[in-house]
Amino acid sequence: NGYVRVYEAKDIMRLNDWTLTHEFQSLRGASCVCWSQSSLFPLLLAVGSDDSTPTAKHIGVYQFHATVNKWRCILDEQTENVFRKINDLSFANWMGRSYHSLAVAGNGLHVIKIKPIEPSTTSETEYHYTFQHIPLCIQDRPSQEVWRVHWNITGDMLVASTDDRRVTIWKQATPNDFEAVKELVASHSSYIPAPTNPAFQSGLTAANQDSSRQHT
């Protein structure tokens, strides 16, 4: 229904008890969310949509304003010229940078640099932001479907999986450029579904035997 709900565990020793703290209207067909990783700048929440409607908006970025206890939109963009849908989002670890790096997976792979600009006067309390799109593309397959993205712990390498059974590792060469440094390709012949995989069956048997011994 396009709503985003934020829950909080009031007591970290009781993680089976979560309280709804915020609820707001976001993108229709919302398919993924992720948090920003910076402890210096205001908290950001990115929302992606896989809505295929031509006029749909596919990316929303929201900032939490503690003074009013609300989430406010800072980026609400119609991206039909870039993405037909978004499958996954991932913020990089901050590591002292002056900007956020948001990886976006869909019918292509992009990194969006979100740079906070501090209030210019003491009377202003809100940050402003600039946005920069960095497309990542391998020349022989410029329009591959990207399903999942994940950063390394330092936020300078990005892993992306695509629908052609490939996993590509990207390294940030300069602040505005990434290069593919490694590619892994899975062949149909080497893939064995888990239930029929001998290694899986062996591990399952061993786990069942250990469980039986613990209960006798």
Image (cartoon, grey):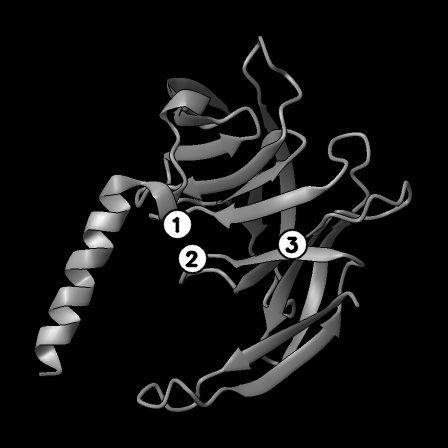
Few, some or many residues within 10 Å of mark 3 (<14, 14–19, 20+): few
Quadrant hosting residue 10: bottom left
Q: Foreground residue, 216 or 33?
A: 216
Any part of residue 152 in sight: yes
Q: Secondary structure at mark 1?
A: loop
Residue 165 lies left or right of residue 88; in this view the side is left
Q: Secondary structure at mark 2?
A: loop
For residue 38, the mark is 2
Q: CA distance from mark 3 to mark 1?
A: 18 Å
Measured along the vertical axis of the image, is residue 6 above or below residue 81?
below
How far from the left and from the top, in percent, is residue 36?
49, 57
C-beta proximity under 8 Å, tags 3 and 1: no
Task: Please report whichever mark, 3 or 1, sits nearer to the chain's N-terminal start.
Answer: 1
C-beta proximity under 8 Å, tags 2 and 1: yes
Any part of residue 111 in sight: no
Q: Foreground residue, 59 or 163?
A: 163
Residue 43 lies left or right of residue 73; in this view the side is left
Please give the count of numbered marks on the rendered protein.
3
For residue 94, the mark is 1
Name the residue rendered at 73%, 41% in the picture: 85
The residue wearing badge 3 is 128
Q: Amino acid at mark 3?
A: His
Name the residue rendered at 33%, 48% in the picture: 95
Which callout, 3 or 1, points to the residue nearer the camera? 1
Q: CA distance from mark 2 to mark 3?
A: 16 Å
How far from the left and from the top, in percent, is residue 58?
75, 47
- Quadrant, the N terminus: bottom right
How far from the left and from the top, in percent, is residue 160?
47, 33
Q: Amino acid at mark 1?
A: Trp
Q: Amino acid at mark 2?
A: Ser
For residue 113, the mark is none
